[in-house]
């Protein structure tokens, strides 16, 4: 393995790594635009120049392979001078409209100019002006701001495998353009907004909604499909403003799809009551949580024989585990299963290996491991095997068919824990409003068996409680002394009981999660 | 060290009082002919020196449109965190962004002028208006229209003169 010296620091890297990679991996910053870890080397921005002993001229660190005994300097006068000049070139026609640019605050042109550039412009001529283009879908191209790094062009060629963008004209007239007849409606499009180092590609979904430095970030997991991509929920004032990719090297996840990126809209304006309700003489009557619990404890204990419990592929492992604990171990129910939406499409695999799964639920695997196979509980109700049902859901797209409603109406009693109530208004006897994934915490097991943790971003509205907390409350009333107080305690208890989860805890899961099946 | 208390021993002329009364009346009479410093507030407003940092205004351009582009530099700079706004795509062709709502909580504002310093558009300024008390807290949370009205009141620099003309004092 080659060992080289960068700024007097001894660095050993994998063979084939570039000088830039070697530096970045060791905390030495070399400014760069066109190089991106997931894309090929373009060598076009000329910002990553460094001095290498033995070469008469400055070299591109992104396109120079790290070799044994190399001596690299990144802080010499000539390097600094080169960066300064390059940045001056980038700014020649740049509008410097940072105050109204959504990228401001996370823009590499801002950061590099601040750190390595000059504070004055020598440009006295008028700047070139190019009108903003709508590329279709959610993407706006602010052509004035482009630094022509070609990351977006290469993204479509190399990651998606379907070229959409190209550089039109040459030299001074170069311009990002879209192939005729195409609009940027591709499902991977949102990623180019993230990889664009400047504010050239802007997402209409976020346009002017907030300044990025005002947003808080919470680490979460996308519930859009069973890939379970790790994401950041960026929020402010009790509202999610955007979802950003949070790479997970442990499972090689580098991107997120647009289904996931805009999925937070499904959880806005959920139609949910401010407290549990119960059906009394055909009327939906609001109850306090205390009343609802007291009644449930009594009613559930009375007749456990034909009671069944249904978990959900949209509920966390913690919630599904608590369902099992309450209904199998304490109430002795025979029938346990879980809800998961039907898989209607095949997985979509892109050139880089990124997969959008056909399974549009985040925790089918976890629910299956905890609650056994998914069975058709409608049939069991029809045949009279189930007369009373306790069900947790969490799918924002849940739709009950008339047939399903007819069958559910046959039940003597139906408890529903869900994030919204309209679907259940006509069938449930008791409805308990629970928090949606942005408002609670827990773990999901994705399609490749990685247990990943999602954290709470928002506070649930008044009267709405996290599902795990509600179930824990119920458990404590049915069997006092369970000794669990928090979601972390629930996961610990789960890890003690289930061999597949052995030694998993929130602390050990960290940001990247842990695989479940290799143990 | 001991202190020896000495009783006040008025002179006979003081004990006579009439001289003291006359002396006081002479002082009063002198002031009667001097320049007056008191103003009849609130009918008359004392004009503050230039650079006074009072109520905030949102400036307008020649066409009467607000200058603000909703960049949130002011709210970022504000140490009291009292500026909030909601941006939107502007209805005018010569700019892209403008504030749909713009709110300053004057209960929290410390009139430091940081917002004015930070603004890249010279769209927000502190004015000479110092009399902006209100009867409810809600009245001191100023919206966009109220801030633009402050501009109309002060843009000609005759805020104090006008108040004098209006009251005729
Ligand atoms: S649009 Fe952005 S990513 Fe694409 S070339 Fe321009 S600066 Fe680079
Ligand atoms: S691939 Fe699936 S998990 Fe990943 S962002 Fe898209 S919907 Fe979400
Ligand atoms: S004057 Fe100071 S405290 Fe008041 S709004 Fe401006 S920055 Fe904030
Ligand atoms: S800094 Fe100026 S332009 Fe920006 S939001 Fe504040 S008032 Fe408007
Ligand atoms: S990063 Fe090396 S040339 Fe752009």
Image (cartoon, helix red, strand yellow):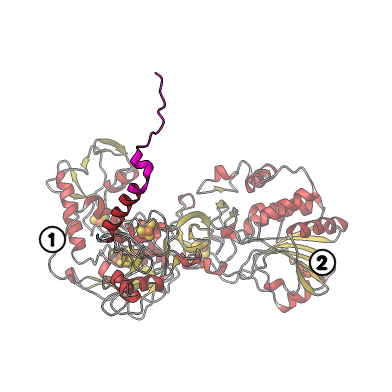
Please state which of residues A68 and A296 is positioned toward the viewer in this rendering. A296
Please state which of residues B96 and A21 is positioned toward the viewer in this rendering. B96
Region in magenta: B1-19
Q: Residues within 10 Å of mark 1 (few under 14, many from 20)?
A: few
Q: Does the residue at mark 2 contact the one at mark 1 (Cβ under 8 Å)?
A: no
Q: Secondary structure at mark 2?
A: strand
Q: Is residue A356 visible?
A: no
The quadrant of the image that shows the N terminus of chain A is top left
| Residue shown at 42% from the left, 57% from the top | B81
Q: In front: mark 2 or mark 1?
A: 1
**Predominant SS along the magenta part:** loop
Chain letter of the residue beneath label 2 in the structure image: A
Q: Which residue is disc 1 drawn over?
A: A122
| Mark 2 and mark 1: Cα distance apart in space | 77 Å
Q: Quadrant of residue A113?
A: bottom left
Q: Which residue is disc 2 drawn over?
A: A413
Residue A382, given in percent of the width and then of the height, sits at: 81, 71
């Amino acid at each position: 393995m080659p060992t080289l010296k960068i700024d007097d620091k001894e660095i050993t890297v994998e063979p084939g790594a570039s000088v830039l990679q070697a530096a970045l991996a060791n905390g030495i910053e070399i400014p760069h635009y066109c190089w991106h870890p997931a894309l090929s080397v373009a060598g076009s921005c000329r910002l990553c120049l460094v001095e290498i002993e033995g070469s008469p001229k400055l070299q591109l660190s992104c396109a120079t392979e790290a070799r044994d005994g190399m001596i690299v300097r990144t802080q010499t006068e000539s390097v600094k001078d080169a960066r300064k000049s390059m940045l001056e070139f980038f700014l020649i026609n740049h509008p410097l409209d940072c105050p109204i640019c959504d990228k401001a605050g996370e823009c590499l042109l801002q950061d590099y100019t601040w750190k390595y550039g000059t504070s004055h412009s020598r440009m006295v001529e008028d700047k070139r002006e190019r009108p903003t283009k709508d590329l279709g879908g959610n993407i706006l191209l602010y052509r004035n701001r482009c630094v022509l790094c070609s990351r977006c062009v290469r993204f479509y060629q190399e990651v998606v495998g379907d070229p959409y963008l190209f550089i039109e004209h040459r030299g001074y007239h170069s311009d990002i353009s879209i192939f005729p007849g195409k609009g940027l409606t591709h499902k991977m499009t949102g990623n180019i907004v993230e990889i664009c180092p400047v504010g050239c590609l802007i997402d209409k979904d976020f346009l002017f909604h907030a300044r990025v430095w005002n947003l808080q970030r919470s680490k979460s997991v996308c519930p859009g499909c069973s890939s379970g991509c790790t994401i950041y929920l960026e929020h402010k004032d009790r509202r999610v403003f955007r979802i950003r990719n949070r790479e997970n090297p442990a499972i090689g996840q580098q991107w997120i799809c647009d289904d996931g990126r805009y999925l937070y809209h499904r959880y806005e304006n959920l139609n949910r009551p401010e407290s549990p309700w119960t059906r009394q003489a055909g009327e939906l009557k609001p109850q306090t949580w205390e009343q609802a619990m007291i009644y449930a404890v009594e009613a559930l204990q009375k007749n456990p024989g034909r009671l069944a419990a249904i978990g959900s592929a949209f509920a966390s492992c913690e919630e599904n585990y608590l369902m099992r604990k309450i209904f199998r171990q304490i109430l002795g129910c025979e029938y346990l299963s879980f809800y998961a939406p039907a898989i209607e499409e095949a997985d979509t695999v892109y050139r880089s290996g990124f997969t959008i799964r056909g399974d549009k639920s985040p925790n089918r695997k976890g629910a299956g491991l905890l609650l056994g196979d998914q069975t058709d509980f409608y049939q069991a109700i029809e045949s009279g095997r189930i007369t009373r049902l306790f069900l947790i859901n969490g799918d924002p797209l849940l739709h009950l068919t008339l047939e399903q409603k007819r069958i559910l109406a046959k039940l003597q009693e139906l408890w529903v824990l869900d994030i919204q109530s309209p679907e259940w208004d006509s069938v449930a006897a008791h409805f308990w409003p629970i928090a949606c994934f942005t408002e609670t915490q827990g773990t999901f097991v994705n399609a490749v068996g990685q247990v990943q943790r999602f954290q709470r971003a928002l506070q649930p509205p008044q009267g709405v409680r996290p599902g795990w907390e509600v179930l824990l409350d119920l458990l404590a009333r049915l069997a006092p002394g369970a000794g669990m107080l928090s979601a972390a305690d629930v996961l610990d208890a789960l890890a003690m009981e289930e061999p597949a989860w052995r030694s998993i805890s929130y602390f050990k899961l960290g940001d990247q999660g842990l695989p479940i099946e290799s143990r | 060290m001991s202190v020896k208390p000495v009783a006040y021993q008025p002179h006979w002329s003081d004990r006579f009082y009439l001289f003291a009364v006359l002396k006081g009346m002479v002082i009063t009479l002198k002031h009667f002919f001097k320049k007056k410093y008191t103003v009849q507030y609130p009918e008359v407003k004392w004009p503050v020196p230039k650079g006074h940092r009072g109520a905030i205004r949102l400036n307008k351009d020649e066409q009467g449109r607000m200058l603000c582009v909703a960049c949130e530099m002011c709210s970022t700079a504000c140490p009291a965190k009292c500026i909030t706004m909601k941006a939107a795509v502007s209805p005018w062709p010569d700019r892209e962004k403008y504030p749909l709502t713009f709110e300053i909580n004057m209960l929290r504002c410390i009139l430091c002028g940081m917002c004015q310093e930070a603004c890249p558009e010279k769209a927000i300024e502190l004015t000479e208006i110092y009399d902006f008390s209100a009867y409810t807290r809600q009245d001191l949370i100023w919206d966009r229209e109220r801030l633009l009205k402050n501009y109309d009141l002060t843009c000609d620099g005759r805020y104090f003169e006008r108040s004098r003309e209006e009251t005729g004092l």
